[in-house]
Amino acid sequence: MRNAPGTTIDLPRDPATGKPTSVVPIVTRGGQTFRGLMTSSAAPLDGGRGECPPADPAPADPENHCLDDASVCVRHNVGSCDRPLVENCFHHDNADRPNFIQAYNAAVVQTEHEWCRLLHLLKGIGDGHRTASSVMTLWVAHDTPPYATPHPLGTSCSRDEGRPVAIQVRLTEVTSANRIWWFDNFAFVTYTSDFRQSNRVRFRGTLPSAPPVTTLCVAESDTVVMSSWGWRNPTVLAGSGAFTPSSRVLGGATWVFPASSVQPVGTRIRRQVTGENLRVRFEVVRTGAC
């Protein structure tokens, strides 16, 4: 394990024997302690067996060679995990493995947390909310709570249902310096800058005759973000498919405004915004209470 200056890293140990009791490293820095992250080694260090710490070149006791006073076994492959002495096994991939449910649930919670953390990090990058908006539009296909939603429960992005003001946003124009093809895909999203409310619409080709509309419940103190992006998939047959890493992004346009600026009820604001590839026109109206 590598230590930064002024930092110590060690495994929790039994005071009596000095042997490790956990595979979660303890990082000590400036008098404070933190839990670390243990990762496996890789070839050629351990021949690609995913063993951490790596096996000795010719261990005298293959079963117990890493159960010493300085290290603890962490294994992923099936054979090693079947050994009774190897309690810290990473192979939870199948439902018949020990601790599968706990590992699965932990992975879901961690993914939800990292998604929310990513949104907040992206909000501070570059041009206002533009980078976060690209993720909110291109990565999120649907919002069907509680399972398919960009507002996972238990995170700082969880949906807040207590916001009293209804704001309706209409996408009235999408144009491009280049031609928009029938197989181009577009997403239109409205969300609060704290990522706790959002509404989205997807469509294909040119803007529908009935312009897409989203309704958002907000507080007077909220900042509202609206954005529209597009993408073109590699083949025409995949034109209506989901956004993928191979899709060509049609750089969108984003507008950010305070919710308090849209009042009283019936107030209507129109704004044209130009992005990298698209020019869009939004229409916002305060419709009353949610």
Image: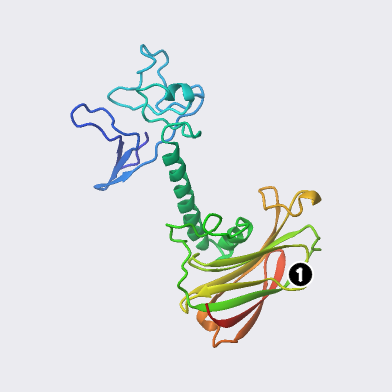
Neighbour class for label 1 at 10 Å: few (<14), some, many (≥20)?
few
Q: Mark 1 points at which residue?
A: 208
On screen, residue 16 above or below 241? above
Question: x, y (%) of residue 96?
Answer: 47, 31
Residue farthest along the left direction in this orientation: 16
Question: x, y (%) of residue 50?
Answer: 48, 27
Q: Which amino acid does label 1 sit on?
A: Pro
On screen, residue 46 above or below 27? above
Residue for point 46% across, 21% down: 79
Q: Which of the 4 image quadrants contains residue 280?
A: bottom right
Q: In this view, does 207 lie to the left or right of 157?
A: right
- The quadrant of the rendering that contains the N terminus is top left
Question: x, y (%) of residue 221?
Answer: 46, 77
Residue for point 44% across, 32% down: 90
Residue for point 48% across, 47% down: 108
Q: Which of the 4 image quadrants contains residue 277?
A: bottom right
Residue for point 66% across, 48% down: 245
Q: Is residue 28 left or right of residue 46?
A: left
